[in-house]
Amino acid sequence: MIARRMSGLLGGLRRSSAWHKFVFSPVTVAAAVVAGTMIICALFAPLVVPHDPFDPLSIDLMNSLIPPVWSADGSWSFILGTDDQGRDLLSAIIYGTRISMIVGFVSVSLAVLIGLAGGLAAGYFGGICDAIIMRLVDIQMTFPAIMVALLVDGISRGILPKDQHDALALFVIVLSLALSIWPQVARTVRASAMVEKNREYVQAARVMGCSSPVIIFRHVMPNVLGPVLVIATINLGTAILGEATLSFLGVGVPITEPSLGTLIRIGNNFLFSGERWLVFFPGITLALLVVAVNLLGDWLRDVLDPKLR
């Protein structure tokens, strides 16, 4: 049922006038090209990168701080230059983009699952269930996302030993970002579920003797996926930016798995010594990725929101 609903949504995209607006919108097409190129490079990073930045045998300290190829001391072997360890910056950015995307996709997916469950329960059952879940949402939304992430990271550091914390760092940051995103999903799903539960097809399912879980997951949930898809796309850029912020602050992914935020933090140490490419290229990559995802999210919102058509 859900698969058919998603197919219907995608089919509607292809048949709608918004699809033609996408084709004839240079900004949206450029955003799709940028996002698609980054996703492909991130997925096939081992095949795309010219050097392996995580292989100690391929790293030479004599190649440290080589400027980009267009500089006087640049080298075609390192198009965007190298860092202080002699690692190829282009390869490190591609791997860092993959880590940032993985954290963003997984955290948004987890937030959607939590928000869907909470929003459907609150909107369909109402009463005490609605009051409890919505008060949790209200409390959660009073705290900034960065504060929630720092709180979860601090608790994990206090509970787990250092070696286990480093091994579970990706899980901790995914959980931190998911906890800061799910309230938006829950509120949207609750509003849609409150409308859908009064529809004729839901009443007919009740008359036929369908149980509440069957009605929720087979009938109500497929009809609230449109707004959820929009929220997930828009929050993907927020999650990627949040991960970069936490990594820049030193509480994100470990240094052995550098993301874009970690590369920016490392480059920031050399900003005033002249090696500006160390922070410029990871920073512009992060900016392009977030802007491209947000533009695609705006287009998707225009397509699926009937008020904006």
Image (cartoon, rainbow, N blue to C red):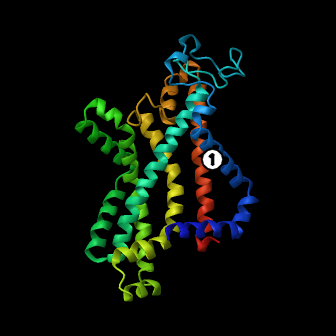
Residue 250 occupies quadrant: top left
Q: Is residue 79 left or right of residue 7?
A: right
Q: Nearer the viewer, residue 99 or 150?
A: 99
Counting from the top left corner in percent of width and height, residue 220 is at 44, 75
* Residue at 63% across, 33% down: 48
Q: Which residue is mark 1?
A: 35
Q: Against 95, is 185 above or below?
A: below
Instruction: Locate residue 202: give its quadrant.
Output: bottom left
- Say which of 130 and 214 sits in front: 214
- Seen as rendered, the residue at the extreme left is 159
Q: Is residue 104 left or right of residue 171?
A: right
The amino acid sitting under disc 1 is Ala
Q: Nearer the viewer, residue 159 or 261?
A: 159
User: x%, y% of residue 281?
Assistant: 61, 32
Left or right of 89: which side holds 114? left
Mark 1 neighbour class, 10 Å CA radius: few under 14, some 14 to 19, many 20 or more: many
Q: Is residue 175 visible?
A: yes
Q: Is residue 288 visible?
A: no
Image side of residue 109 versus residue 87, left or right? left
**SS for callout 1:** helix
**Residue 94 in the image, given as x and y percentages of width and height:** 58, 34
**On-image quarter of the C terminus:** bottom right
Residue displayed at 60% across by 74% down: 306
Q: Is residue 161 above or below residue 152?
A: above
Residue 263 x, y percent position in the rendering: 51, 30
